[in-house]
Every structure is written in structure tokens, then in C-alpha cells.
Image (cartoon, helix red, strand yellow):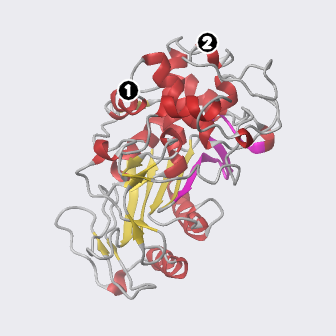
């Protein structure tokens, strides 16, 4: 495994950072900083990124990793492979994994009416005769909005783990007689006809796992995904990841907000580190298996990654990034993140930051492309 000690350069707020690789390693002098590091640091300065954690995976090993800046500026805390970042919509790949585990066990039919599994009835109010299925949720074709303005209160943040319980909220939110019902969340499109990325749709997918198994969604993932993948400090709620070192959540280059949760948490609230989330990526690269433990069958992974909605470049939640990669990006308060895998070459890229709206870490962005080009050396 090739580890590179990261050393940071002063950027927008005039601070210096260091980030260590192996224990006891000594940071090299600035003159030894690689061209890749310098390019990443320059782009961080231009874009105002407080910190960045990234790695390249080949097969079942991290072959390159580096950490830059401060995960907490005030505390002068440099990120490491164990620093836990909020991942935003990268979380959706984990939620899809949970649903497909139930499909493998015969507990979930992707094309069956959701109402066969839920304790309350869900119907598109404008198309009540068209069933909504799990496949519709996995391909973002349920008729549910993202939302992008349809509900101004949708993205309300709750301190720590105080967001309402998933099932009761969804019932009140999606059923017309519910106390939190927003009619605009149902688009004028019959289920199965129009693609629109939907956070509430993935929240419903997470609740489907909960309703079928009788186990809280976060607990289900701990037992069936994180435990076999040796991801002890990963989870969908703060109580599942503390006392791990947490990256602070930045709303601007210098302003922070507290750790938070949201009602639609299966879509966006996964927290993990480079070290642990690399295990999830490795499982997908190696036919569903990590370190002798299997979370999915290889055929199931192939089914998830193939195109199901060609016009949107979408598989079952997973997206086609081009250049042989599929994956997902994430963006939310305090988060810009990306997960990419190239199964043909058994390569994966993870890039985590702790500030929102930084497209430089997404496919086509400068930092992403720098790391993707570095990964080409391992093909």
C-alpha cells in the first residue's frame, strides 16, 4: 500500500495544515510536495475548501490516500483516514444495498405494489390506480419530487439526533390527510414514467426496509452492512459514530454549524471515514465481498450497476459517470462528496469535504479529475 503523508499549504484563510499517513511518519519539507498535492491544494484555496480527504482503491487495498487542510479550523484538527465525514447523497448507495439484500432473500419484490409491505397506503393522488413499486424508488420514477422548492421546510435541520421518526413522518407527509402533507411533492407524472431524483423517495425506500424487517433502518444497516464490512464507526445517526473524530460542518470558508440530522435520513445522513467507507467500495469492486464477508451477490451488484434509465444514466440508484466509472455524489449543508467505482479495472475513488456546493470534487471537476488521472496509473 502506498501511503502519502499530506502536508498542507496555507490557503484562503491563511492557515497551514498537516495530515499524517502511517503512525510515526514525518511530514516531508514543503519542497517535497508532489505535483498532485500542489494542484489539489491550489484548487482547495481557489474554492475555499476547509479540508479534503481522498483515496484511490485498487481491488481490496487503498493504493493512494491523502488528507489536506483542517477538518476543524478552530481546533486545528487535521483530517486523517479515521476522520468521519457526513456523506450526503452518497448515502443512497447504502440504502439501495439494504433494499437489495431483502430482494436477494425473497422478502422484497421490486415490481410489487409498495402497499403490500407498508403499514399505511401510499398512492400518487393524481394517479391512484398506478401502483408505486420499489423499482420506481430505485430509479427515481415514483412521481415524488426532489424537492427543489416544492416544500420550503423539507430541508429543515434538527440538532444531533432529534429528527422525527421515519415511519410516522412519512405517513403524515405523503398521505393526503396527513398533518404535514404537501400536495406539491407529488409531480404531475404517473409512477414509472418520469425521472426526478427524489430524496423523499429514498427515505421511503429506507422505511420499506424497516417495515419489512421490523428493525429500525439504521440498526438494520449496522447489523447487515456495517458489521460485516468492519465499519464500526459508521452510521446514519450521530450516536452510531461518536466518539469518532468528526469533521466540522462549514457553511462558508470560516463559518460552522452544529452536527445535525434530517427527517429523510436514509437519503443523506450516512457518516463514515475514508478508512471505513473504503470497505464498502471494496465490496462492490469484489463481487459483494470484503475480507471474507459478503453483503451482496455479484449478480445483484451487476444488476444494480447496469443502466435501467438510459436517458438519465441511472442504474438502481447508481449513476454512470463516464470514463468507466459509476457512483454517486453528495451535496448538503457541510458536505460535497463523491464515490466512484470502475468494476472492470477494480478501481474506486473516494473524495470527502466538509463544505457544500463544491463541484470541484464531482466528476468533471478539477480535484476529481486530478485524482481520477492519478488512479489511471493503477489500471
Would residue 300 be found to the left or right of residue 211 on screen? right
Q: Residue at x 78, y 39 (%)?
A: 187
Region rendered in magenta: 312-332
User: Mark 1 — residue?
Assistant: 224
The local secondary structure at tag 2 comes to helix
The answer to whether residue 248 is visible is yes
Q: Could you say which disc has been placed on residue 116 in the image?
A: 2
Asked if residue 43 lies left or right of residue 240, the reply is right
**Membership of 143 in magenta stretch:** no
| Residue at the farthest left position | 24
Q: Residues within 10 Å of mark 2 (few under 14, many from 20)?
A: few
Towards the viewer: 142 or 324 = 142
Quadrant in which residue 110 is drawn: top right
Closest to the observer, 379 or 261: 261
Q: Residues within 10 Å of mark 1 (few under 14, many from 20)?
A: some
* Mark pair 2, 1: CA separation: 23 Å
SS state under label 1: helix
On screen, residue 15 above or below 96: below
Asked whether residue 97 is in view, the answer is no
Kindly indicate the quadrant of the structure image that contains residue 50.
bottom left
Name the residue: 21% across, 69% down. 25
Residue 190 against residue 256 in the figure, above or below = above
Q: State how many labels appear.
A: 2
- Is 321 colored magenta in this rendering? yes
Q: Position of residue 282 (x, y in %)?
A: 43, 40
Amino acid at each position: 500500500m502506498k501511503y502519502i503523508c499530506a502536508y498542507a499549504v496555507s490557503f484562503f484563510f491563511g492557515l497551514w495544515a498537516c495530515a499524517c499517513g502511517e503512525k510515526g511518519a514525518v511530514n516531508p519539507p514543503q519542497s517535497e510536495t508532489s505535483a498532485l498535492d500542489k494542484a489539489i491544494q491550489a484548487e482547495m484555496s481557489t474554492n475555499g475548501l476547509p479540508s479534503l480527504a481522498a483515496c484511490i482503491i485498487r481491488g481490496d487495498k487503498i493504493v493512494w490516500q491523502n488528507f489536506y487542510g483542517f477538518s476543524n479550523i478552530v481546533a486545528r484538527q487535521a483530517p486523517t483516514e479515521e476522520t468521519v465525514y457526513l456523506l450526503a447523497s452518497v448515502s443512497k448507495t447504502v440504502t439501495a444495498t439494504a433494499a437489495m439484500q431483502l430482494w436477494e432473500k425473497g422478502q422484497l419484490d421490486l415490481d410489487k405494489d409498495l402497499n403490500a409491505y407498508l403499514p399505511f397506503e401510499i398512492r400518487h393522488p393524481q394517479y391512484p390506480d398506478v401502483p408505486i413499486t420499489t423499482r420506481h424508488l430505485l430509479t427515481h420514477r415514483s412521481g415524488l419530487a426532489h424537492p427543489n422548492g416544492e416544500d420550503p421546510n423539507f430541508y429543515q435541520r434538527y440538532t444531533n439526533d432529534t429528527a422525527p421518526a421515519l415511519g410516522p413522518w412519512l405517513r403524515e407527509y405523503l398521505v393526503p390527510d396527513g398533518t404535514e402533507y404537501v400536495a406539491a411533492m407529488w409531480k404531475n407524472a404517473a409512477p414509472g414514467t418520469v425521472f426526478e431524483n427524489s430524496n423523499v423517495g429514498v427515505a421511503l425506500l429506507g422505511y420499506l426496509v424497516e417495515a419489512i424487517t421490523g428493525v429500525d433502518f439504521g440498526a438494520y444497516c449496522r447489523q447487515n452492512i456495517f458489521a460485516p464490512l468492519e465499519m464500526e464507526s459508521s452510521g446514519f445517526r450521530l450516536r452510531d459514530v461518536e466518539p469518532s473524530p468528526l469533521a466540522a460542518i462549514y457553511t462558508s470558508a470560516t463559518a460552522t454549524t452544529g452536527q445535525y440530522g434530517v427527517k429523510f435520513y436514509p437519503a443523506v445522513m450516512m457518516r463514515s471515514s475514508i478508512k471505513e467507507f473504503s470497505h464498502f467500495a471494496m465490496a462492490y469492486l469484489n463481487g459483494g465481498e470484503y475480507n471474507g464477508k459478503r453483503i451482496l451477490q455479484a449478480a445483484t451488484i451487476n444488476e444494480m450497476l447496469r443502466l435501467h434509465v438510459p436517458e438519465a444514466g441511472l442504474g438502481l440508484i447508481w449513476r454512470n459517470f463516464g470514463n468507466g466509472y459509476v457512483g454517486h455524489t453528495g451535496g448538503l449543508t457541510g458536505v460535497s462528496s463523491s464515490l466512484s467505482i470502475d468494476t472492470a479495472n477494480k478501481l474506486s475513488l473516494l473524495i470527502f469535504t466538509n463544505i457544500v456546493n463544491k463541484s470541484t470534487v464531482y466528476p468533471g471537476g478539477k480535484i476529481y479529475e486530478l485524482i481520477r488521472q492519478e488512479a489511471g496509473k493503477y489500471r
